[in-house]
Amino acid sequence: MSNIPADPLLRIKKLSDSLENNEFENTSALIFAFRQEKDLLRDLPAVFEGALESILERLESTAMFGGESCSFSQSDLLAALTIWLEKAKSYLEKQLGIV
């Protein structure tokens, strides 16, 4: 049995906690984890998937070019990922009538 929660809000919390606590082994592992969230993305409008992929592609660039030496700031992209998670959580809460 997988340790990945089925509930989309729990999935977001797990990703947020992992990101906040630097639990990803490296940037590639972080990107892989987010790209594996197909079930979560199905619960969100398509614009979320496009925005996420944009962030992940830029993170891949920072990994290839040494983090901050790339034209994208890795720390800014991680902040953007945090914002993406917050917006996804807010959207889902509204859909579920929690907020």
Image (cartoon, grey):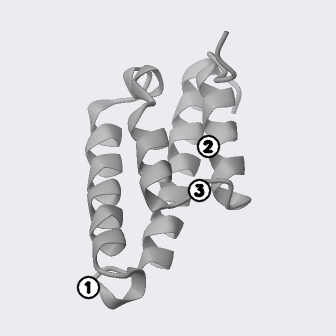
Q: Earlier in the sequence, mark 2 or mark 3?
A: 2
For badge 1, the amino acid type reads Ser
x%, y% of residue 42? Answer: 38, 21
Q: Dot 1: what SS? A: loop
Circle nearer the viewer, 3 or 1:
3
For badge 3, the amino acid type reads Glu
Q: Earlier in the sequence, mark 1 or mark 2?
A: 2
Question: Image point 69% across, 22% down: which residue?
Answer: 3
In the image, farthest residue toward the bottom: 69
Name above or below for residue 71 compared with residue 82.
below
Question: Image point 42% across, 43% down: which residue?
Answer: 32
The crowd level at tag 1 (other Cα within 10 Å; few <14, some 14-19, many 20+) is: few
x%, y% of residue 72? Answer: 31, 79
What residue does disc 1 label? Answer: 71
* Front one among 57 and 52: 57
Question: Image point 74% across, 59% down: which residue?
Answer: 21
Name above or below for residue 65 compared with residue 92.
below
What residue does disc 3 label? Answer: 25
What residue does disc 2 label? Answer: 15
Q: Dot 3: what SS? A: loop
Q: Viewed as shown, does residue 87 lie left or right of 51? A: right
Name above or below for residue 1 compared with residue 36.
above
In the image, which disc is placed on residue 56? none
In the image, farthest residue toward the top: 1
The crowd level at tag 2 (other Cα within 10 Å; few <14, some 14-19, many 20+) is: many
The answer for how far apart the CA atoms under marks 2 and 3 are is 14 Å
For badge 2, the amino acid type reads Leu
Quarter location, residue 49: top left
The answer for how far apart the CA atoms under marks 3 and 1 are is 23 Å
